[in-house]
Image (spheres, rainbow, N blue to C red):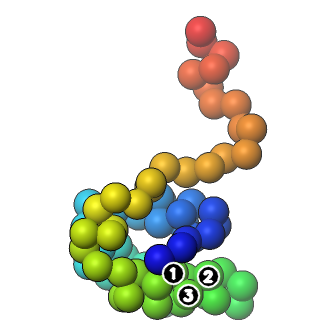
Amino acid sequence: MNYSMEEINLMCIYDCTSRSSLIDNLEEAAEYVYDPDMLKLIDQTIEKLQHTTDNEFAVLPLAPAWDDVETEDTFNE
């Protein structure tokens, strides 16, 4: 299953220890989201996760892509 950068970033802000907990977190969060674009992203991510096996999920590169954003650690070096 191919995930977009936006979907990966979305997944990274929730508990990614298991596919089922991530789906639960996204479904719970969707109840409080009123932005139609964000709801669409959450829904399509859940749909993809439901069609992803646990083995496939285990090897997903779940690291956020922040597009050249410098972190505080960068300034402390």
Mark 1 element type: helix
How many dots with numbers?
3
Residue occupied by mark 2: 41
Q: Please name whichever residue, 60 or 31, is drawn nearer the observer in this view of the structure.
A: 60
For this view, does 43 lie left or right of residue 35? left
Mark 1 neighbour class, 10 Å CA radius: few under 14, some 14 to 19, many 20 or more: many
Alpha carbon distance from label 1 to label 3: 4 Å
Q: Residue at x 63, y 63 (%)?
A: 5
For this view, does 75 lie left or right of residue 58? right
Residue occupied by mark 3: 44
Give above or below for 13 relative to 47: above
**Tag 3: residue type?**
Gln
Q: Residue at x 33, y 68 (%)?
A: 57
The quarter of the rendered structure image containing the C terminus is top right
Regarding residue 34, the answer to whether it shows in the image is no
Please say if the residues under marks 3 and 2 sit with CB atoms less than 8 Å apart. Answer: yes
Alpha carbon distance from label 1 to label 2: 6 Å
Alpha carbon distance from label 3 to label 2: 5 Å
**Tag 1: residue type?**
Thr
Q: Quadrant of residue 73?
A: top right
Mark 2 element type: helix
**Tag 2: residue type?**
Leu
Residue occupied by mark 1: 45
Please say if the residues under marks 1 and 2 sit with CB atoms less than 8 Å apart. Answer: yes
For this view, does 55 lie left or right of residue 47? left
Q: Position of residue 10 (x, y in %)?
A: 54, 66
Q: Quadrant of residue 23?
A: bottom left
Please say if the residues under marks 1 and 3 sit with CB atoms less than 8 Å apart. Answer: yes
Mark 3 element type: helix
